[in-house]
Image (cartoon, rainbow, N blue to C red):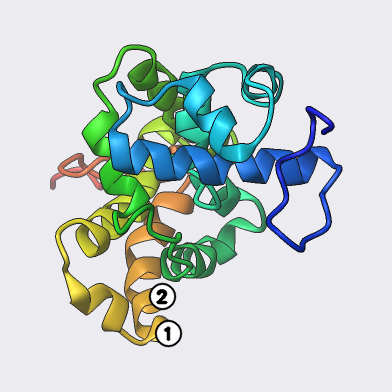
Amino acid sequence: MDADSPRPRAGEPRPRCAEATSAALLDAAAARFARDGYEATSVRDIAADAGVNPALIYRYFGSKEKLFVSVVSRDRDPATVIDGPMDELPDRSVTWFHNRPPAIAGEHPLALMLRSAGREGVSDLMRAQVRDTVAALAARLDGPDAELRAAMILALNVGMGALSSIAGVDVLMAAPPDRLRDHLAAAMMPLIDVPDAATTTPQGAEKTTTAESPANP
């Protein structure tokens, strides 16, 4: 058997491409991580389940830690939300929210991620992924406090997913998409489009004009 191809099921043709091998490894890793936990899962176990050489995990993912992060963020990378016109960000956020990822052995990937976030190596990768997303979004925002505003926008997206998937707040998923979009836009758009700091007056400051005030008689 070609070491670069996952073992086919009975009666199925054997796939012979990197994409199929990567997908098979992700599927096998998801099942193992959910069933046995992060620490008890070995690279050899995952490779054996996928029917490939363990070296392919390092070729495609680099490490067990990076494979884990790929599993829990599969099809749910927040970075995909920021691609596109900024005025359509609320629409993309609603679509991202409704595109629920498949459960991993009955567990939502976000719950699995939080449960394993403290593992050595995993937490650093996850933090780096989030920081990179915040930085990429901040680079697309004009005006002051771009990084802060980007972090708040991302928090809205991640927070909706956490409330719905982990806390079971069903009102979010049950809300009509257009209503959810309207409320989300009301929160996001002031963070996306801010007035030019040079043309605004700080709250509490006295407004000045170019005309001199009339002298007291």
Question: Looking at the picture, does residue 188 appear above or below residue 73?
Answer: below
Give the structural element (helix, strand or loop) at label 1. helix
Q: Nearer the viewer, residue 10 or 53?
A: 10
Name the quadrant containing residue 203: top left
* Residue picked out by circle 1: 178
Question: Looking at the picture, does residue 182 appear above or below residue 81?
Answer: below
Residue at image coords 27%, 52%:
159
**Among all residues in the image, which is located at the extreme front?**
10
Residue 127 percent location from the top left of the image: 38, 24
Apparent side of residue 147 relative to residue 212 in the rendered image (left or right): right
Q: Nearer the viewer, residue 111 or 164?
A: 111
Residue 16 percent location from the top left of the image: 86, 43
Q: Is residue 105 visible?
A: yes
Q: Tags 2 and 1 in contact by the CB under 8 Å rule?
A: yes
- Three-letter code, disc 2: Arg
Q: CA distance from mark 2 to mark 1?
A: 5 Å
Give the structural element (helix, strand or loop) at label 2. helix
* Residue picked out by circle 2: 181
Apparent side of residue 213 relative to residue 33 in the rendered image (left or right): left
